[in-house]
Image (cartoon, rainbow, N blue to C red):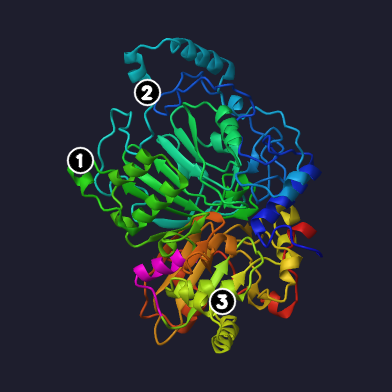
Amino acid sequence: MDGPDPFDGDEEAALRYAIALSMQESGMSPAMSTSGKPTIVLSSDEDDDDDDDDDDLDKGPSYPPTPKKTANPSTSPTKSENGGEKGYATSAATSAVTSSSPATNATAAAATTTSAPSNSLAALGLDRKKMEEERLARIAKRKAPSSGQETQDRRQRVKLDESPNIASTAATTRFGNLPYPKGVVKKTWAFGYPRQDDIKIEEVFQKNDLQLAVLSSFQWDEEWMLSKLDIKKTKLVCIAFASNEAQKEEMRANVPKNLIRFCFPPMVPYGTMHSKLQLLKYPTYLRIVVPSGNLVPYDWGETGHMENMVFLIDLPRIEDQTARSYNNLTEFGEELRYFLKAQGLDESLVNSLANYDFSETSRYRFVHTIGQSHMDEWQRTAGYCGLGRAVTSMGLNTSSDIKIDFVISSLGSINMELISTLYNAAQGDNGLKEYGTRTAKSNKKKAVADNNNSSLKEKFRIYFPSHDTVAQSKGGINAGGSICAQSKWWNATTFPREMVHDCKSVRQGILMHNKIMFVRHAFSGKFKAAWAYVGSANLSESAWGRLVKNKATGQPKLNCRNWECGVLIPVPTDDNADESHHADLAAFQSSVPVPMQVPGEAYGATASKKPWLFLEN
């Protein structure tokens, strides 16, 4: 690929472009806004609701019984448009296997603007005609409201601590009836493979008891997602991308406000809403879910071609009002709250996190990237600076050597500066070590940096599938759409090809959409402390940010493109472990499943194979 890079090394933007092309080739068409950019669309029907301000999620219209959903007998693999990840559409009528992120100009030019006929909400039993009649009736009722009526109709904000509408529900003990009170990491279930400590989306949602779901995703399949929920019982808040106010209004108008509300995080140009956080509220507890997969069927194993990883923990509701006032959210909870507030989620909802017992999260850390420039709070807020801070706060910082195995689904325009930065952060550095070397004028310091970079190639393994691995997988090349690299980046002289190893699953024939970092201290007589990252961030500057000098103040400034989030999970030390136990990552299995074959063929160093290049297949 010659000429200038229209994606500026941003693998997520490149993915969006490829998916728009594949949609055009397959005859499928992405839902497009008036600005020509793909959006999440939760209904294809137009619902002129401009005059209706009854968007209180605590209320809702009466709906007819929901009919059983007719199965689609021809679920077939097809490249589908998404927010940077392509795979399988469950139905030809699905209108929104779409992006929650902005497309590049190239994407907009490549995508078609025709709209696919669909009514996903109607397919789930929502009578839009009846809903429209009810809406008009509500408008007429409010034509001349009395002061008492105005007070009664005033909207109430969604709260995680809303009293359950189940008379028989009793308060639980601290760990009573909680499936995952101490937190767990599981692989996603995959069709056609034996079930072994995995989890299905139905088991995550538990829709029969789910009262409120706050969902964020990089990619959405509306019909499939809603089929996993009981929207007569569950209120839904979608944290999604919109490029402008008109697009936000269009998205709001396409859904019943009493059921679904949106949160639109502020975005920088070319940024991506890539985080996949879920907050699931039940009568007596709150479930926090951090998956690596999106809200699409193939990421949750329904085609049997792709696997992901999920962290989840259940937090009991604090019933005693006095205890709530003294509740400590822990560092995990504080960072979660900070992240949600930055996204613009309703303040009362964010504050109601304090009504849940976060004590069991104290062993973990919630790490995130907030898509913007960070001035004064760059050490706290985001990216690799926040990663280093979290490692230190867990007491896992070290000046000795560490080893890193990083499983990713996208390879961007990376270089040794980024590798060095992440390595330092994994040791507990706040970002200033690499920044100081990079901005130093001393040639001696830069020579030291070059030597350090050379040694890093023995300590840092990047797992990314070769072309052969994708082609020989169960789903073949059509299943590799959410895996991204480009030859332009791979062939660059600054690209660390020697560090790339083939990524093959221990479940033979399945591909990965994981983002997992395994970090362990170098062996020295016994197995030392280790930890893992599970989340949404790939190995890219877009995901982890870049610390630069603020020209106005001369102080560091952290620039981040993406919204990302993940969890740091410590691994218990094992004084009886030997070196082989340490070398093959076996010590992680009790805390975080190791999904790939280790160490994997180092095809980048030997040039024995080429990587999976999605635009060239």
Q: Vertical placement of 559 versus 350: above or below?
A: below
Residue 229 versus residue 462 in the image, above or below: above
Q: Position of residue 16 (x, y in %)?
A: 69, 50
- Local SS, label 2: loop
Identify which residue is drawn at 59% across, 39% down: 244
Secondary structure under tag 3 reads: strand
- Report whether residue 598 is seen: no
Residue where numbered disc 1 is placed: 321
Q: How would you classify the magenta stretch by its main secondary structure? A: helix
The answer to whether residue 145 is seen in the rendering is yes
Look at mark 3 in the image and give the residue it sits on. 460
Mark 2 belongs to which amino acid? Answer: Arg
Which amino acid type is marked by label 1?
Gln
**How much space separates mark 1 and mark 3, taking CA atoms?**
49 Å
Mark 3 vs mark 2: give the one in front: 2
Image-based side of 363 in relation to 342, left or right: left
- 1 vs 2, front mark: 2
Residue under circle 2?
154
Drawn side of residue 291 relative to residue 338, left or right = right
- Return the x and y of residue 17 as percentages of the image width and height: 72, 51
For the point 39% across and 27% down, the residue is 58
Number of marks drawn: 3
Disc 3 to disc 2, C-alpha distance: 56 Å
Q: Is residue 518 magenta?
A: no
Judging depth in this view, the residue of 465 and 146 nearest the camera is 146
N-term mark: 1 or 2:
2
Work out whether 497 lies above or below 122.
Answer: below
Residue stretch rendered in magenta on the structure: 384-398
Mark positioned earlier in the residue sequence (1 or 3):
1
Dot 3 amino acid type:
Phe
